[in-house]
Image (cartoon, grey):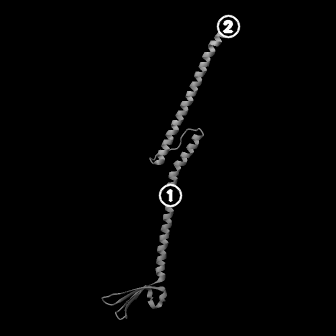
Amino acid sequence: YGIELFDENGDLFWQFSTKDITKQEIPSSELVTQTYTDENTGWTYCIYRPASVIIASINNILFFFFGLLFCSFLFCLLFSHYLAHFLVKPLKELAENIKHITQNEYTVTVTYDASDEIGEVVSNFTNMAKELNELINLHYNTLINQQKLEIQLLQAQINPHFLYNTLSLIN
C-alpha cells in the first residue's frame, strides 16, 4: 500500500509505499484507491492498496465469521439436544409407567423432583397410582372378607341341617 500527497497544482511532492512498490508498478485495475482533498490547503491525499490485500483480509474475516457461526450452530444444536433429552426423559418414563399400569402392574418407578409442569404431572401420576393400588388392595381384601363371611354363613346353614339329619338317622 502507499500514500501520495499532491499540492494544489496536482504535482506529487511526497510519496510513501511499502516494499518498494509504487503505484505505477501495479495495474490500476488491481488497486483500491481513496482520495481526499483538503479545502484549506488544496492538497490532495491519495491512499492506495492492492485489491488482493483487501480480499485476503476479507477472507480472513469471513473465515473467522463462518467458523464462529458454525461453532455457535453446533453449540445450539448440542444444547437443544441436551434440553430436549432433559425434558423428554421424564415423559418417556411416565409413558412407560402408564403402560405398566394398563398391564395391572401398579408400581411407579418414575421420579422427577423439579417443580415445573412435568414435575407436577409426574407427582400427580405417582399419587394416583398409589391411590389406585390402595383401592385395589382394599377391594381385594373386601372381596376376601366377603367370601369368608359367605363361607361362614353357609357353614352356619349346614350345621343345623347336619344336626337334624344326624338326629333323624338315630331315631
Q: Quadrant of residue 39?
A: bottom left
In the image, which disc is placed on residue 36?
Answer: none
Q: In the displayed orientation, state which residue is furthest to the left.
A: 40
Q: Is residue 77 above or below residue 62?
A: above
In the image, which disc is placed on residue 168?
Answer: 2
Q: In the displayed orientation, state which residue is furthest to the top.
A: 171
Q: Label 1's element?
A: helix
Q: Please give the name of the residue rendered at 47% of the width and 83% of the height, measured from the top-left corner.
A: 51
Q: Please give the name of the residue rendered at 46% of the width and 48% of the height, measured from the top-left corner.
A: 117
Q: Quadrant of the N terminus?
A: bottom left
In 3D space, how far apart are the residues under numbered discs 1 and 2 (Cα atoms)? 89 Å
Q: Please give the name of the residue rendered at 53% of the width and 50% of the height, measured from the top-left corner.
A: 89
Q: Which amino acid, by three-letter code, is at mark 1?
A: Ser
Q: How many marks?
A: 2
Residue wearing tag 1: 80
Q: Please give the name of the residue rendered at 51% of the width and 37% of the height, measured from the top-left corner.
A: 130
